[in-house]
Amino acid sequence: MNNKNITVLLTENIHKQAEIVLKELDFKIKRLNKAPSEKELVTNLKQVNVLCSRSRTHINKNVLLKSNLNCIGVFCIGVSQVDLKTACEKGVPVFNAPYGNTRSVAEMVIGLLVALSRSLFDHSQNLHKGIWSKSAEGCFELRGKTLGIIGYGNIGSQVSVLAEAFGMKTLYYDIVSKLPIGNAKPSFNLKNLLKNSDFVTLHVPDTPQTKKLIRKKEISWMKKGAYLINTSRGTVVDILALKQALKTKYLAGAAMDVFPIEPKSNQEEFRSPLQNMESTILTPHVGGSTEEAQLSIVFEVCKSLKRFLKTGSIQNSVNFPDLLVPAIEPKVTRVINIHKNQPGVLTEINKLVSRSGVNINSQYLATNEKVGYLIMDLEKKNVQKLAEKMSKLEVSIKTRVIV
């Protein structure tokens, strides 16, 4: 596939640097500076090879079945908005930026810890109203306090390191065993972490298991006077249960950067039961919204897209087997075949190659439970005809030629 034949759709106001990088690769660029509805997305994906989106663009089964995408670039950490199973079955690898904004989110969490512990938000609001409320009551240092981290991944572990620099003790809980960094200590269960933490911060993905992970029961396990911070996903906290805990002063405060229902654009009004609650900081999903993070995400995702489109490499794809391959040598044509992972596929493909008389210079294969991903570097003679025959095999999902 020639780069000039590749069309990329950018949604949700993705950083302009992404357009610059992709244009340098001779890709055609289309922009949609909002999160499109399903109908809008299906319409805009006609004649599009690559979709670049963020967290508010929902790429469901219907969208995938009605498109002819080669790959998807998700310019954020989470990929819950993409139907990864259907994407895999359709032969569409998905690439994200698992590290791009981790530092930005971690720094914001530390800022929220300080703001909550010192009642900075309430003091600021009072001054804006002309109220001078200088007092040490209800204001505390972070030093010596315990921070409970739920989800000890890329962000949670960085929060742990930064919190220790403030003299905090750190506990963490994760469903996967993780090696502690610094003096962090693992908690054997969620209840133990909540009971022993002065501050609790959430860093988990949006999954059926994490939906309303923090409900009335879990809040009751927390220390009276503790604080809750959520910069992960809006579905993780039962907002009404949190509101009640804040209203009764069982919790001293909370900071929410994510919400179950969020506006699709800056023009849409935001509404939440937590609005106007005392000692409650609300921010508009800006944990990873720094210039540095957005640029880092752009380069991370664009690098993966470039590598896939130019060489077929699927290293770091979230829904395909991991496979890194070298650049294409001058005298060969690379054929990529994505097929159902079942016995006998390679035998069928190799029979076609043998009959075609095309010589194989090198071959690479990786599989997961759903698909097989085959790359063949072939002599240029009759390769297009061979690729067409491969694409017509019953087991084939998608066949692509890179020239």
Image (tube, rainbow, N blue to C red):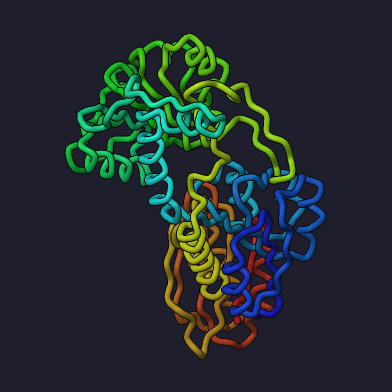
Depth order, front residue of 401/126? 126
> Residue 316 location in percent, x, y?
45, 58
Name the side, left or right, on which 299 lies relative to 252.
right
Residue 206 shows in the view: no
Q: Residue at x 48, y 37 (%)?
A: 232
Q: Residue at x 57, y 30 (%)?
A: 129
Residue 308 shows in the view: yes
Q: Residue furthest bottom?
A: 331
> Residue 177 location in percent, x, y?
28, 35
Q: Residue at x 53, y 57 (%)?
A: 95
Q: How many marks overall? A: 0
- In the rendered image, which quarter contains the N terminus? bottom right
Name the side, left or right, on which 30 lies relative to 76.
right
Instruction: Give the image quarter of residue 379.
Output: bottom right
Q: Residue at x 38, y 51 (%)?
A: 103
Q: Is residue 363 above or below residue 317?
A: below
Instruction: Give the image quarter of residue 68.
Output: bottom right
Depth order, front residue of 103/338? 103
> Residue 222 location in percent, x, y?
36, 16
Q: Is residue 265 above or below residue 236?
A: below
- In the rendered image, which quarter contains the C terminus? bottom right
